[in-house]
Image (cartoon, coloured by chain):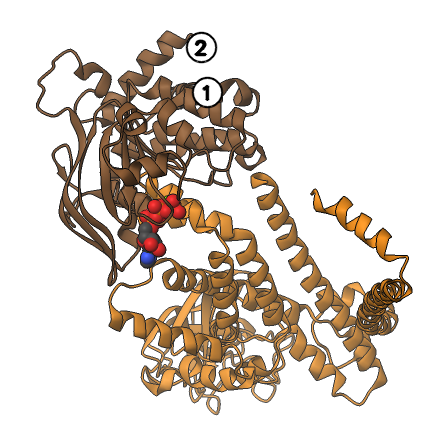
Chain colours: A brown, B orange
């Protein structure tokens, strides 16, 4: 199918679920009410008695790539998982402070997590395609949230797979099991799966850590491609990756945000000694 | 990587000194020893495996050589006649199929549902958690309880239902549906004493409908309308009541439509396929429920095991897309665990098919001529029939019993084969 028609169909489909037209259309009526997708204010988070996050305050800018860096165990994943409430199933996890996604209070227990997770997609470190066909994997999210007929669904699947840059590799075997794909393809499939529900924010927790350099590059290109439509937050241990593909970077250390600023600044003239040591590879 | 050549050089240098040469020798011997040990261990494993295979082959061989010659169509379709050459196991085969099918239909949803509840919906509160762990402990313990115990439990819980809902005697059950009761009268003409003068006196039965099974016996009156079976149909007939010691009409037709004034009718019932009563009595349903008790713990535990082996990353993936807990279970966890659940269910059902002790308690050794017709119908199962035959003194019955075992094995194996094929299909779909 023609790519531009695919684009319009998909936009029509997405508008079905989105309360307002999705991010891209927003640019026409710049209300400037919020340029921030997610705002954290004095956020503290615990696992039982153990405090994993201390007084986190940061704003994730809309339609940009924000990178979280920091040594292992410093709470990057924890914060990311609070962004779409993946911590709900960890009974010991609780938090205080302020955390908002637009108008939604993310710490409010009564928040509708189903809709929240449609709007905030997540991609995990290890590719986790469902043991179903490639098509079914991508169609899983849309089936949960939208009423689509067959052709709309297959358009949406194609659009997502194209966006995630795997379409060419899988178009001839959409009904083949997803577990038969290579690791890199699986990860891109997971990204396609995440964007098929039309999210505003895409969270990626070390999406490339298990991939070869070529697949890593493919995913970095993909982020570049997606950044003007989505707000992306990526956790990475790869300094080059953070400096290559992010607009802003937050450096975490022992549950605190030590420094948060433009990527250029963090990597060229950080204001904190710790940040400098870390980005120069002197520890962590 | 770079260490290997260095090591090699070092060893080479050492060869000069005899002491170190010895050391190397020792090391070499040691590795030979380890390899030998490995070899012996493998042989031992093969040996042990062979023993079980040999025993199995011997068992199957002896059963087949004894049983196959007596395997016949009569055995499959006949009723358990007292004459060995005419004896068949059809009622028992049908009983086994009925009991096991109903048992599976009841047990699988309950067992899998329980496993899903325990594994996928772990409670948050401490108290609920405690209750869950008590339940878990109980399930593990119940799996080891001898099945006879379940038979006794089934007897009180399902057959008589603790006597809480009426008794098993006719007309004293608290709830009954799908049964019509009749009082059956025999005609006067067929009475050999009364109808001496009548030639070709045909035996005829007249049925008077009874409203409630606890009603007193119908008192027949002249001119009363009753029913008579002709083939499968009930047609109404008008009967006459005559005093057998008084003057009898000479017309044989009138006599054949008459009944004696002092006849006491026999109460019979006609039950449809949906017949249901409380308490259950010694019927198919009580047997199935008792077998459920036997295999439920096994199914729960194996389903739990299967659910636990589903990687949590799959659940996270589905939740991350906005699936509700129920959608995660239904769309992701259950399909991924299905092969494992199926395997456990097969094993459990195989056990149910072969189970004798609880059925012996629930159904007893009864002479059954028909396949069960409804859930409350009395029945027998193949293992019981086999047991029955083996306990007879005649040699011929032992041969039939062996043939019955072959039939039981065939049912078991085909049951397993279906499940294996199903599982293979499921796995092929996802791998
Ligand atoms: N489910 C949990 N229960 C208790 N403690 C946890 C749990 N998950 C994480 N933690 C703790 O919270 C802290 C932060 O963990 P987190 O996973 O956020 O680190 P991270 O920055 O993502 O590390 P990495 O780079 O290794 O992924 C760690 O000390 C970890 O031990
Ligand atoms: Mg992490």
Front position in the image: B317 or B386: B317
> Is residue B217 visible to the viewer in this orientation of the structure?
no
Front position in the image: A141 or B260: A141
Q: Tell which circle, 1 or 2, labels the residue nearer the N-terminal end.
A: 2
Percent of width and height locating residue A182? 57, 32
Asked which secondary structure carries label 2, the reply is: loop
Asked which secondary structure carries label 1, the reply is: loop
Circles 1 and 2 on the same subunit: yes
Q: Is mark 2 within 8 Å of ligand 2?
A: no
Mark drawn on residue A1: 2
**Location of residue B39 by image quarter:** bottom right
Q: Is residue B348 toward the left or the right of residue A148 in the image?
A: right
Q: Is residue B320 toward the left or the right of residue A30 in the image?
A: right
Task: Residue at 70% x, 42% y: name it.
Answer: B2
The residue marked by circle 2 belongs to what chain? A
Residues under labels 1 and 2: Cα distance? 16 Å
Percent of width and height locating residue A215? 51, 26
Q: Which part of the image, by quadrant, shows the N terminus of chain B? A: top right
Front position in the image: B177 or B293: B293
Task: Residue at 50% x, 48% y: name it.
Answer: B336
The residue labelled by disc 1 is A165
Q: Are marks 1 and 2 in contact (CB under 8 Å)?
A: no
Mark drawn on residue A107: none
The residue marked by circle 1 belongs to what chain? A
Percent of width and height locating residue A89? 30, 54
Task: Residue at 39% x, 43% y: name it.
Answer: A283
């Amino acid at each position: 199918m023609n790519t531009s028609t695919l684009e319009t169909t998909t936009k029509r489909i997405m508008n079905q679920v989105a309360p307002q037209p999705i991010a891209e259309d927003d640019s026409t009526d710049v209300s400037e009410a919020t340029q921030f997708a997610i705002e954290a204010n004095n956020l503290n988070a615990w696992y039982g008695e153990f405090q994993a996050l201390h007084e986190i305050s940061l704003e994730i800018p809309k339609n940009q790539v924000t990178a979280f860096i920091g040594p292992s165990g410093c709470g990057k994943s924890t914060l990311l998982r609070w962004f779409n409430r993946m911590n709900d199933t960890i009974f010991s996890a609780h938090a205080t402070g302020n955390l908002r996604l637009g108008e939604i209070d993310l710490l409010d227990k009564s928040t509708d997590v189903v809709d929240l997770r449609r709007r905030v997609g997540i991609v995990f470190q290890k590719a986790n395609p469902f043991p179903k066909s490639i098509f079914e994997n991508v169609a899983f999210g849309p089936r949960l949230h939208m009423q689509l007929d067959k052709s709309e669904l297959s358009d949406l699947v194609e659009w997502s797979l194209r966006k995630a840059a795997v379409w060419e590799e899988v178009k001839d075997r959409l009904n083949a099991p997803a577990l038969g794909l290579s690791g890199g393809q699986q990860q891109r499939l997971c990204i396609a799966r995440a964007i098929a529900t039309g999210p505003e924010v895409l969270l990626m927790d070390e999406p490339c850590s298990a991939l070869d350099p070529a697949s890593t590059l493919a995913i970095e290109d993909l982020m570049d491609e997606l950044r003007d439509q989505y707000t992306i937050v990526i956790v990475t241990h790869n300094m080059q990756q953070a400096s290559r593909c992010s607009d802003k970077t937050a450096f975490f250390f022992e549950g605190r945000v030590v420094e948060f600023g433009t990527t250029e600044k963090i990597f060229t003239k950080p204001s904190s000694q710790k940040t400098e040591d870390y980005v120069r590879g002197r520890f962590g | 990587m770079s260490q290997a050549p260095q090591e090699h050089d070092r060893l080479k240098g050492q060869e000069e000194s005899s002491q170190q040469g010895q050391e190397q020798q020792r090391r070499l011997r040691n590795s030979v020893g380890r390899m030998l040990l490995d070899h012996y261990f493998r042989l031992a494993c093969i040996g042990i495996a062979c023993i079980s295979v040999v025993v199995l082959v011997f068992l199957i061989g002896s059963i087949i050589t004894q049983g196959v010659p007596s395997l016949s169509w009569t055995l499959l379709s006949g009723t358990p006649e007292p004459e060995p050459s005419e004896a068949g196991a059809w009622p028992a085969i049908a009983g086994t199929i009925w009991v096991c099918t109903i048992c599976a239909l009841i047990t699988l949803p309950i067992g899998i549902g329980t496993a899903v509840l325990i594994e996928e919906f772990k409670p948050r509160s401490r108290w609920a958690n405690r209750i869950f762990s008590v339940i878990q402990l109980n399930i593990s313990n119940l799996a080891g309880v001898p099945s006879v115990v379940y038979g006794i439990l089934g007897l009180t819980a399902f057959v008589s239902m603790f006597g809480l809902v009426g008794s098993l005697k006719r007309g004293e059950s608290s709830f009954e549906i799908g049964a019509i009761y009749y009082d059956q009268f025999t005609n006067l003409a067929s009475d050999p004493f009364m109808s001496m003068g009548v030639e070709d006196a045909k035996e005829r039965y007249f049925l008077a409908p009874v409203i409630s099974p606890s009603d007193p016996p119908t008192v027949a009156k002249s001119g009363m309308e009753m029913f008579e079976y002709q083939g499968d149909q009930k047609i109404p007939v008008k009967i006459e009541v005559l005093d057998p010691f008084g003057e009898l009409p000479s017309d044989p037709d009138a006599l054949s439509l008459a009944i004696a004034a002092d006849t006491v009718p026999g109460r019979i019932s006609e039950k449809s396929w949906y017949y249901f009563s409380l308490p259950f009595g010694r019927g198919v349903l009580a047997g199935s429920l008792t077998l459920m008790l036997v295999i439920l713990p096994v199914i729960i535990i194996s389903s739990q095991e299967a659910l636990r082996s589903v990687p949590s990353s799959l659940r996270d993936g589905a939740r991350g897309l906005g699936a509700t807990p129920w959608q995660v279970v239904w769309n992701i966890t259950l399909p991924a665990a299905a092969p494992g659940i199926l395997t456990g269910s097969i094993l459990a059902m195989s056990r149910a098919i072969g189970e004798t002790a609880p059925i012996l308690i629930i159904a007893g050794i009864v002479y059954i001529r028909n396949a069960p017709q409804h859930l409350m119908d009395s029945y027998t199962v193949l293992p019981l029939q086999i047991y029955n035959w083996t306990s007879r003194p005649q040699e011929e019955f032992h041969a039939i019993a062996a043939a019955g075992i072959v039939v039981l094995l065939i049912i078991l194996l085909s049951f397993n084969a279906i499940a294996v094929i199903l599982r293979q299909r499921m796995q092929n779909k996802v791998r």
